């Protein structure tokens, strides 16, 4: 249920609830469930949606919404016309930027790992062995 709260936060806000450049601060925020609904990205999101997320991102699992309670939450059962009127375009753009940064970071880590393995002779040796076992055309 905690994960559902995090995913819902990311989908509606466009960024993770516990983001921080410093890993210690980020873990501290996670362990204390310290997050905010920043007006710039959350002003168009309903109070019911924020309430739903707040009831999922609770540290004590006994006080967190269960799956059944989550499905019965007014945000899920509310009028779909009122939901259709909400524009989340700015949030969508923030989510795109977040996803691009995540992909770029993964690519950079892949290049760093490849360079380290190559400098150790691990990557080039295993690659040349694979090339030797390939059938020639």
Image (tube, helix red, strand yellow):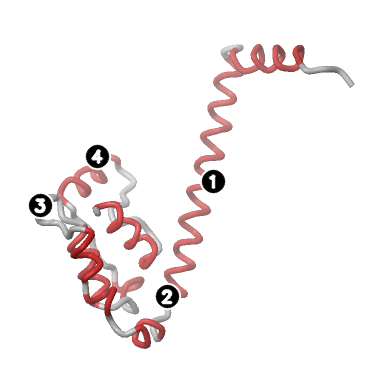
Tell me the quarter of the image containing the C terminus: top right
The 10 Å Cα crowd at callout 2, few under 14, some 14 to 19, many 20 or more, is: some
The one nearer the camera, 123 or 60, is 60
What's the distance in space between the residues labelled 4 and 3, CA to CA? 26 Å
Q: CA distance from mark 3 to mark 2?
A: 32 Å
First reached walking from the N terminus: tag 4 or tag 1: 4
Q: Disc 2 or disc 1, which is closer to the eye?
A: 2
**Mark 4 packing: few (<14 Cα in 10 Å), some, or many (20+)?**
few
Mark 3 sits on what residue?
62
* Residue found 41% across the figure and 83% down from its top: 84
Q: Furthest residue to the front?
A: 68
Q: Residue at x 23, y 63 (%)?
A: 36
Judging by the rendered image, the residue that carries numbered circle 2 is: 88
Q: Position of residue 74 (x, y in %)?
A: 22, 76
The answer to which image quadrant residue 71 occupies is bottom left
**Which badge, 3 or 2, comes first in the chain's sequence?**
3
Query: Which of the two discs, 3 and 1, labels the residue nearer the N terminus?
Result: 3
Q: Is residue 124 above or below residue 68?
A: above
Judged by depth in the image, the label closer to the viewer, 3 or 1, is: 3
Q: Secondary structure at mark 4?
A: helix
Dot 4 or dot 3: first in sequence order is 4
């Amino acid at each position: 249920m905690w994960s559902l709260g995090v995913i819902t936060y990311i989908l509606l806000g466009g960024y993770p609830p516990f983001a921080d450049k410093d890993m210690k601060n980020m873990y501290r925020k996670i362990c204390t469930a310290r997050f905010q609904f920043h007006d710039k990205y959350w002003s168009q999101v309903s109070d019911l949606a924020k309430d739903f997320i707040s009831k999922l991102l609770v540290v004590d699992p006994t006080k967190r919404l269960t799956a059944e309670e989550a499905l019965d939450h007014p945000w899920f059962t509310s009028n779909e016309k009122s939901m259709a009127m909400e524009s989340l375009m700015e949030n969508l753009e923030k989510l795109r930027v977040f996803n691009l940064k995540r992909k770029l970071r993964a690519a950079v880590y892949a290049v760093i790992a490849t360079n380290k393995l190559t400098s150790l002779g691990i990557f080039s040796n295993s690659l040349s062995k694979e090339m030797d076992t390939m059938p020639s055309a």
